[in-house]
C-alpha cells in the first residue's frame, strides 16, 4: 500500500511540474529582451520592444513598437500584430523615457511590480529623450541590444559613474517614505568625454523637444530618422534621482561622481589629477572602501562619510624636471583626496538642496540611532537639509611598473 501511495505521489508531482495549462510552443512565442515605455500626448503608452522570434534554426532579432491606453493593452496589441504570444520572463532591461519620468512613472512601476514574469533584478534605465529612440538603435547598431546596454551600465557602475539601476531598488525606494531612487541616464548621440549636456533638474522640462507621437508608422522607431551612414551611439551620461515615481532632478557630472564614490562595487575606476606644480597623473583604483557613520549631537545629526581609495598609476605627464618619486606620489595622492572630497561634497549639496535621501541615511539612522529616527521620521527632508556632513577621504597610490623603472 505504501508503495502504491508513493507511486501516486510521484505521478502527481510529474503532472504538476509539467503543468495542466495549454503549453505554448517556442516558435509561437516572441521573447522580449528589452521593454521601453514612453507616454503619448493623448494619453496611454507607447511601448518599444527588442525581442527575438525563435524560428527553429536561430533567433531573429526584431524591434517593434505598439501603442495602447494601458501597458497591458499595448502588449496585447503587439501580440496580435506579431501573431505571437509575448514572453516577458526573459526581459532583463526596462527603459523609461524622460518625459514619462517627469510626468509620473508610478503606474508603469505598478505594472512592473505586479507582473510575475518580470525579474525584479532587471536593469532599469532612464533615457534622456525617449525609450523608443534608445531601443530602436539596435536596428543600426546591433551591439546596442539589451545585453549590450546592460553591460555598458554595469561598467559605468564599477567606474563609479552610475548607480546599479535595478528594478527592485527603484520599487523599494518608491515604496519608502524617505529613500530616493536612482537610475543611470542614457543619452543617444555623439558625446564629448562621456558627459552629456542634460538639464540639471526637472525645471528644465520646458526645454525638451516634444515627442512626435501622432505618426502612423508605429513600427518605425525614432532612431530610423538618423541620417544615412550615421552610426548611433549611446553613453551613460548621469544619474536620475526619483522621488517615488517622479523624476526629481538629474545629478550633474561632479555630483554623479561623488555619489558613485559612496557606493559599493567600484573597481578599476579612473582617477586623474593635475596642477601646475606636478603636471598630470592618471591612475586606476585598485581597492575602494566607503562607509557612512551617523552621530546624534543633541537635536542634530552628523554623518561621517569615510572613503579609502588605493590606486595604481597608469600614465604621467609631469612638469619639466620632475620624476615620479615618493614625494610626487604623496603629492598626487593629496590631489586625489581633494578631488574626490569635492565630488562627494557636490553630491551632498544636491541632496541637501532638494531634501532627498540619496545615500540611504534613514536606514542607517534607524539602526544606529533609533530614538532620533522615531523623533524625526515625519520630517526627514528637513533632517537631510540641516544635518552636518563630515567628509574624510584617504588616497594611496601604489608603486607601478613605470615608477619602479624610473627609481631604478
Image (tube, helix red, strand yellow):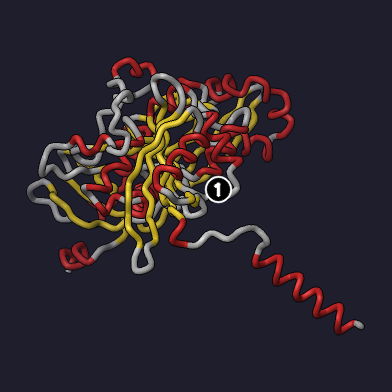
Measuring 66% from the left and 63% from the top, which residue is drawn there? 19
Q: Nearer the viewer, residue 104 or 44?
A: 44
Crowding near the residue tagged with mark 1, few <14, some 14–19, many ≥20 C-alpha atoms within 10 Å: some
The image position of residue 16, as x and y in percent, is 71, 65
Q: Residue at x 74, y 30 (%)?
A: 371
In the displayed structure, 310 sits above or below 101; it is below
Residue at 76%, 70% in the rendered image: 12
Dividing the picture into quarters, in which one does residue 18 lie? bottom right
Which residue is more in the foreground, 303 or 195? 195
Q: Position of residue 152 (x, y in %)?
A: 33, 50
Q: Position of residue 124 (x, y in %)?
A: 45, 42
The quarter holding residue 81 reads top left
Q: Secondary structure at mark 1?
A: loop
Q: Is residue 336 above or below residue 210?
A: below
Viewer can see residue 34: yes
Residue 159 in view, yes or no: no
From the image, which quarter does the N terminus lie in?
Answer: bottom right
18 left or right of 117 in image: right
Task: Answer with left or right where residue 371 lies relative to residue 275.
Answer: right
For residue 113, which quarter of the picture? top right
The residue beneath circle 1 is 120
Amino acid at each position: 500500500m505504501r508503495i502504491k501511495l508513493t507511486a501516486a505521489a510521484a505521478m502527481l508531482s510529474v503532472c504538476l511540474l509539467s503543468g495542466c495549462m495549454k503549453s505554448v510552443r517556442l516558435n509561437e512565442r516572441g521573447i522580449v529582451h528589452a521593454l521601453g515605455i514612453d507616454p503619448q500626448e493623448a494619453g496611454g503608452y507607447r511601448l518599444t520592444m527588442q525581442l527575438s522570434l525563435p524560428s527553429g534554426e536561430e533567433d531573429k532579432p526584431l524591434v517593434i513598437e505598439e501603442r495602447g491606453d494601458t501597458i497591458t493593452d499595448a502588449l496585447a496589441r503587439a501580440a496580435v500584430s506579431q501573431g505571437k504570444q509575448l514572453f516577458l520572463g526573459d526581459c532583463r532591461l526596462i527603459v523609461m523615457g524622460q518625459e514619462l519620468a517627469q510626468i509620473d512613472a508610478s503606474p508603469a512601476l505598478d505594472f512592473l511590480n505586479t507582473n510575475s514574469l518580470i525579474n525584479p533584478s532587471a536593469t532599469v534605465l532612464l533615457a534622456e529623450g525617449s525609450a523608443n529612440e534608445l531601443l530602436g538603435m539596435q536596428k543600426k547598431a546591433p551591439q546596442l541590444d539589451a545585453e549590450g546596454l546592460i553591460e555598458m551600465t554595469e561598467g559605468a557602475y564599477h567606474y563609479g559613474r552610475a548607480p546599479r539601476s535595478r528594478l527592485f531598488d527603484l520599487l523599494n525606494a518608491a515604496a519608502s517614505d524617505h529613500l530616493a531612487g536612482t537610475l543611470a541616464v542614457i543619452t543617444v548621440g555623439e558625446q564629448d568625454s562621456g558627459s552629456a549636456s542634460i538639464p540639471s533638474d526637472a525645471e528644465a522640462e520646458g526645454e525638451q523637444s516634444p515627442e512626435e507621437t501622432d505618426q502612423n508608422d508605429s513600427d518605425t522607431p525614432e532612431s530610423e530618422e538618423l541620417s544615412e551612414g550615421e552610426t548611433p551611439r549611446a553613453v551613460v551620461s548621469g544619474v536620475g534621482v526619483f522621488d517615488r515615481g517622479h523624476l526629481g532632478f538629474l545629478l550633474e557630472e561632479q555630483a554623479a561622481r561623488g555619489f558613485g564614490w559612496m557606493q559599493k562595487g567600484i573597481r578599476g575606476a579612473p582617477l586623474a589629477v593635475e596642477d601646475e606644480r606636478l603636471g598630470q597623473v592618471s591612475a586606476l583604483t585598485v581597492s575602494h572602501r566607503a562607509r557612512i557613520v551617523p552621530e546624534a549631537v543633541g537635536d542634530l545629526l552628523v554623518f561621517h562619510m569615510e572613503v579609502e581609495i588605493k590606486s595604481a598609476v597608469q600614465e604621467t605627464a609631469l612638469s619639466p624636471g620632475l620624476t615620479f618619486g615618493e614625494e610626487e606620489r604623496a603629492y598626487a595622492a593629496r590631489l586625489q583626496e581633494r578631488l574626490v572630497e569635492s565630488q562627494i561634497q557636490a553630491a551632498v549639496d544636491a541632496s541637501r538642496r532638494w531634501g532627498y535621501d540619496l545615500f540611504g541615511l534613514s536606514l542607517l539612522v534607524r539602526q544606529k540611532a533609533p530614538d532620533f529616527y522615531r523623533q524625526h521620521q515625519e520630517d526627514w527632508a528637513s533632517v537631510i537639509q540641516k544635518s552636518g556632513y563630515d567628509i574624510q577621504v584617504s588616497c594611496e597610490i601604489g608603486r607601478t611598473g613605470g615608477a619602479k623603472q624610473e627609481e631604478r
